[in-house]
Image (spheres, rainbow, N blue to C red):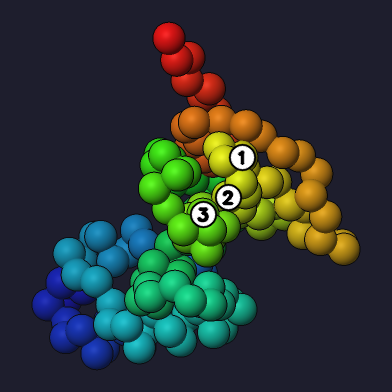
Amino acid sequence: MSLMTLPLEVLEILFLYLGVEDLSGVWKVVGMEGSDSFWMKVCRREGFKKIPGEEEDWRDVFQRNINWITETYRKREYKFQKISSMSLEVQRVMLKDTVHRKNLLLKGNENEVLVWNLENDPEVVQKLSVDYIQVSGSKLYTHIASYS
């Protein structure tokens, strides 16, 4: 009997016994995706948590955590608007992201990005003045525009 002929509910019961390294691949093989409740069970079993304030389904939570474990990162790009067109509250929360779960990137004043170390006591470890920022895996790329 082929796995592809089994109902989704049966596949989910079977796949709960697999390790996290195999889950994404086995779902691709059967040509289906597990339900949100399946991914929630896997995430809770592995200790993967949702990011507060983020609206993501449990499959995304699983994938985000697996990307860190397997070092296959998602590319993220950020472009800043002109600061004068935004309120101060919007400026301060415009950019937030983490690099290796140790550093937090926050938008500061003007074209400034604050890099916070979160390992022990949170502290600002670097201030970057940039017009463009890109996070790709563990690499942080910045660009300072030249105006004429």
**Which mark is nearer the camera, 3 or 2?**
3
Which residue is drawn at the image coordinates 77% and 59% (left, top)?
118
Residue at mark 2: 107
Secondary structure type for disc 2 = strand
CB contact under 8 Å: marks 2 and 1: yes
The x, y position of residue 147, in whole percent, is 45, 15
* Amino acid on which the number 1 mark rests in the picture: Glu
Quick check: 104 left or right of 90?
right
Q: Where does the N terminus fall, quadrant-wise?
A: bottom left
Residue at mark 3: 91
Between the residue at mark 2 and the residue at mark 1, the CA separation in whole angstroms equals 6 Å
Location of residue 144 with respect to 106 vertically, above or below:
above
Mark closer to the chain start, 2 or 1: 2
Secondary structure type for disc 1 = strand
* Amino acid on which the number 2 mark rests in the picture: Lys
Residue at mark 1: 112
Which residue is drawn at the image coordinates 32% and 83% (left, top)?
36
Depth order, front residue of 27/46:
46
Q: Can residue 80 be seen?
A: yes
Q: Where does the C terminus fall, quadrant-wise?
A: top left
CB contact under 8 Å: marks 1 and 3: no
CB contact under 8 Å: marks 3 and 2: yes
Quick check: 115 left or right of 86?
right
Mark closer to the chain start, 3 or 2: 3
Location of residue 90 with respect to 146 vertically, above or below:
below
